[in-house]
Image (cartoon, coloured by chain):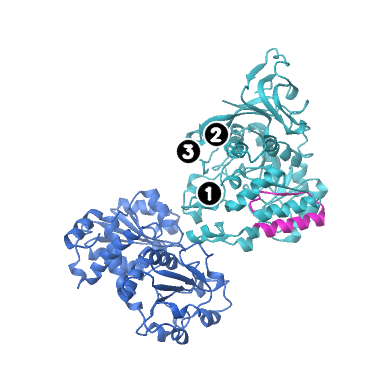
Amino acid sequence: MTRIPHLLGLEELSSAQIRGLLSVARRFADSPSLDRAPDLLQGKTVGLVFFEDSTRTKTSFETATTALGGRPMDFSAATSSLKKGETTYDTLITLKNAGADGFVVRHPSSGGPAYLAAKLGFPVVNAGDGHHEHPTQGLLDALTLEEALGSLKGRRVLIVGDIIHSRVARSNAHCLTKLGADVVLCGPPTLLPPEGALPGRVTPRLDEELASADAVMMLRIQFERQSFFPVPSSGEFTRFWGLTAERAALLKPEAFVMHPGPMNRGLEIDSLVADSPRSLIARQVAMGVPTRMACLAAVLAPDRLEQWAKKEGVVP
Amino acid sequence: MSATSLLIKGGRVVDPASGVERDADVLLSDGKVKAVDKPGAVPAPAGGTTVNARGNLVLPGLIDLHVHLREPGLTHKETVESGTRAAAAGGFTSVACMANTLPVNDSGIVTAFIRERARSLGHCRVFVVGAVTQGLAGEKLAALGSMAAEGAVAFSDDGMPVMNSLVMRRAMEYAKYLGLPVISHAEDSNLSGKGLVNEGLVSARLGLEGNPAASEEIMIAREIALCRLTGARLHIAHLSTRLGVELVKRAKEEGLPVTAEVTPHHLSLTDEDVIPYRTCCKMAPPLRTAEDVAAVRAALASGVIDMIATDHAPHSELEKGVEYDRAPNGIIGVETAVPITYELVLKGELKLSRWVEALTLAPARLLSPASGIDGLGTLKIGAPADLTVLDPSAEWTYSAGSVRSRSRNSPWLGEKLKGRATLTVVGGVIRHRI
């Protein structure tokens, strides 16, 4: 596997690099206990810098760091000097001087982690940047899907919701396409990217796509944050783009349903669907830690990872 | 520094106002153009200076109708002194500065202050553009009459659109009475919203809010309608879209007093240049598509777009060296305008005389009669001794150390460029010489 100095997005990774990360993550996921994970991050301190609130992603990175023998250094933006006017760059420099060997960065600005990585010249893992990418989410979704479907080659994955503002949609579109899947991006016409901007076909007509999908990934719709929303109402969103039980019945019997969370039950996804046997939602959550372990090891301890992978017979 | 006699020998003189494009000697004396004649026909002045301009272009002093000198109040970005020094180094003998200073130039006293700074510290002529509305807030008219009385040459809320059509109408009516043009930063800010980059494939790919071309085109259409209604002179700043060009073309065909400018960056760069989140390519209007670039180039060549103006917008490294969405709009431009736009002449897309006109006579016409200077933008006998000598084949690197502006927010920083001003004379005084 070619070295990955920073994990900023899946757009810039080759399919071989993505497959390499997934192989490592798969091995961690198959391990019976996190206690038996190799100490690839022994002696390393990982700065967890979340300039935007997140509980599940941060906890997942924290667990991944600890599982590999590393030390998480938590930085909570809400109570920090950022509120006193410090720049994000100075924040990271401060943490670096306090001993961090690399950073996991959640940033409200698209391109924020890339900016910090370029300016710092220091390993950065993007934990979600604005509307741009959420690479570890894309990888864990791919891991989940491969577990359920086997090879993704020629499989059709339907991503539904606010595509234009979704970093999850972007990372998934790049990742799944590189793994050979046929991606369809679907949502209200006001929330779709122009055709050709992202890999995958773009359509506002959900009902026409359901029968041919091997998996449907529903995205969260943030009605609460918008003063002006590009859909007349949440009810109208549910009516035309929500994965209701009736709509789920149009899917192939063996098709899967996914959601990166947090879910708005009854809005973009019906509880009956979210909790049905075809739901991979719990499995997605379970894949979070092993995927992030693989990403942290690849970026912060590439030599150790390579030795371990060779010894264990893991593909990269 | 006082004006002496200056003989510019053997250069290729291009003066669109008199249709001259030939090798000639130019004599400047007493702050005026004294003679333009065939090589060797003008005797060297006693006690004067002679400059050999063989292989160089000798032009009327270049005029940039759109710069931000940031004084008063924002002197960490630029000052009248540093901005005009940079302009003179870029070959400009005149600039017009926008009103978004601190405080805003919305009163006679601020206009007078800037004029005084320019008089005492300027390295080139400075024409002052006053605000359209108080505080650039788009609500109440600024002191248009008082600013005109203190020498303002035009009005603009540049940087901020005047969203209220009635306010813009009243401003145009008043400006018409004062005989001054209104310069429009055409942008429907409701439609452009939080747009950070041209709306299209690039914005969708980068996950940045898009600013659609339509937001500019809607406002150009409105300004033209108000121009028709009021009869005021309208100038469209930094025109960047293909349809915007069409709208201006139709307005001109209709005979309306409409002019337009285009920036070097909108003539040369596209939204692809923003990748990967380069704040030195962030400005308003944003860099558009290759199709738009082709359209503004063709419009400049045909004269639909009258002039080149840089929208020189200095910002400090502290302000620009941040996340893309947090960086302010604008790039510096006065030191690179010549090589970046001369490239179009080299490529054969723009006639030499048209290029010169777009940097001299066309902006001079917009400044007339408010500039109060007969012959500005020309090398006619008796015109002011404002002259620029360019070496079109000079290759040089726009290095950080060579930047004269107080800021360095340029996409061309560190790049090798071709074509450079070697001599800039303002009112008979040498202000820049290599």
Residue depicted at 38% across the width and 64% down the height: A175
Tell me whether the residue at label 3 lies in contact with that at label 1, contact meaning CB atoms closer than 8 angstroms: no
Look at the image and tell me whether residue B150 can be seen: no
Name the residue carrying label 1. B281
Secondary element under disc 1, as helix, strand or loop, is: helix
Give the residue type at disc 2. Lys
Name the residue carrying label 2. B418
The foreground one among B196 and B273 is: B273
Q: Which residues are drawn in magenta?
A: B216-241
Secondary element under disc 2, as helix, strand or loop, is: strand
The chain letter corresponding to blue is A
First in residue order: circle 2 vs circle 1: 1
Please report, as a chain letter, where disc 2 is located: B
Tell me whether the residue at label 2 lies in contact with that at label 1, contact meaning CB atoms closer than 8 angstroms: no
Disc 3 from disc 1: Cα separation = 15 Å
Do marks 3 and 1 share a subunit? yes
The chain letter corresponding to cyan is B
Look at the image and say whether residue B230 sits in the magenta stretch: yes
Residue depicted at 51% across the width and 52% down the height: B272
Q: Nearer the viewer, mark 3 or mark 2?
A: 2
Q: Is residue A254 above or below residue B257?
A: below
Mark 3 nearby-residue class (10 Å; few <14, some 14–19, many ≥20): some
Give the residue type at disc 3. Gly
Look at the image and tell me whether residue A303 can be seen: yes
Q: Is residue B250 above or below residue B30?
A: below
Name the residue carrying label 3. B414
